[in-house]
Image (cartoon, grey):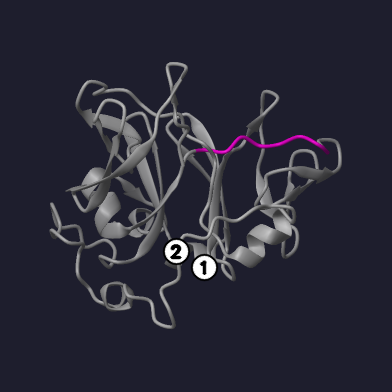
Amino acid sequence: MYSRQINDQEYTFGVSGKLIMNVLVMYDRQTKTLWSQLLGEAVEGPLKGTKLEYLPSWQTTWAEWKALHPDTLALRKGYYGSRDPYFDYYDSSRSGVIGQSHRDDRLYVKEFVIGVALDDLAVAYPFSVLNEQPVINDALGDTPLLVVFDEESVTGVVFDRRLGGQTLTFESAGEDTLRDQETGSLWNKLSGEALDGPLAGQHLNRVKSTSSFWFGWKDFYPHTRVYGVDEQQP
């Protein structure tokens, strides 16, 4: 999710019908510039090179979202009926509409991953690994990361583990909570808010992450690290 404000002007966006390595390309109606959905960056047109401001969001179930935000409003965009029209595509091993840009067999082509890219570095956290390790203390370059996964709602979020000049280390403290080892504070695992303890009321900062098929992520980031896979290779 991105802000539509660019240089103090509000822009509106549509779907161009184009793809870059199987990923949606948007356009803005004001300048007709083309934008990569995954990168959040203008790739062709008057605004080429401009980056949209990232806004924290996540893919989750309606039930999980309502539990966190009971007063939320929902936008209904239509109804497909009893059968998902994309079921056959998701159930197949097809690598998107135009195929893979390069082959990488570290994961099944349609393994879901949570991808994080910072500067020139990237890492992918496979759902198969997150199912077994739903709380991960990791780092990408100089940025210490906390990756949290809820298997029931298939929700994954990524935070910066730094707070007030201190790098925190987290562990599960129950179904919906975490505890940091440094202060013993209790945290909501999806919102990143400290609920109790010395850090109560403080929030961890979200890090931009993307839920993606493996074939889409590795085509954009061919040198990505794969957590839980690369570490096991000799």
Q: Looking at the image, which is closer to me, 104 or 88?
A: 88
Residues at marks 1 and 2 touching, judged by CB atoms closer than 8 Å: yes
Q: Residues within 10 Å of mark 2 (few under 14, many from 20)?
A: many
Q: Quadrant of residue 82?
A: bottom left
Is residue 232 left or right of 33 when viewed as pictured?
right
Residue drawn at point x = 65 percent, y = 66 percent: 63
Is residue 105 left or right of 87 when viewed as pictured?
left
With respect to residue 195, does 143 lie above or below?
above
Please give the label number shown on residue 225: none
Q: Position of residue 132 (x, y in %)?
A: 53, 68
| Res. 222 in view | no
User: In the rendered structure, which amino acid carries the disc numbered 2?
Assistant: Phe
Q: Which residue is mark 2?
A: 127
Q: Looking at the image, which is closer to me, 20 or 231?
A: 20
Q: Position of residue 202 (x, y in %)?
A: 76, 34
Q: Is residue 203 magenta?
A: yes
Q: Position of residue 33 (x, y in %)?
A: 24, 29
- Assign a secondary structure to mark 2: helix
User: In the rendered structure, which amino acid carries the disc numbered 1?
Assistant: Asn
Magenta residues span 200-207
Furthest-top residue in view?
7
With respect to residue 16, does 67 lie above or below?
below
Q: Is residue 150 magenta?
A: no
Please give the label number shown on residue 131: 1
- Main SS of the magenta part reads loop
Q: Quadrant of the C terminus?
A: bottom left
Q: Quadrant of residue 28?
A: top left
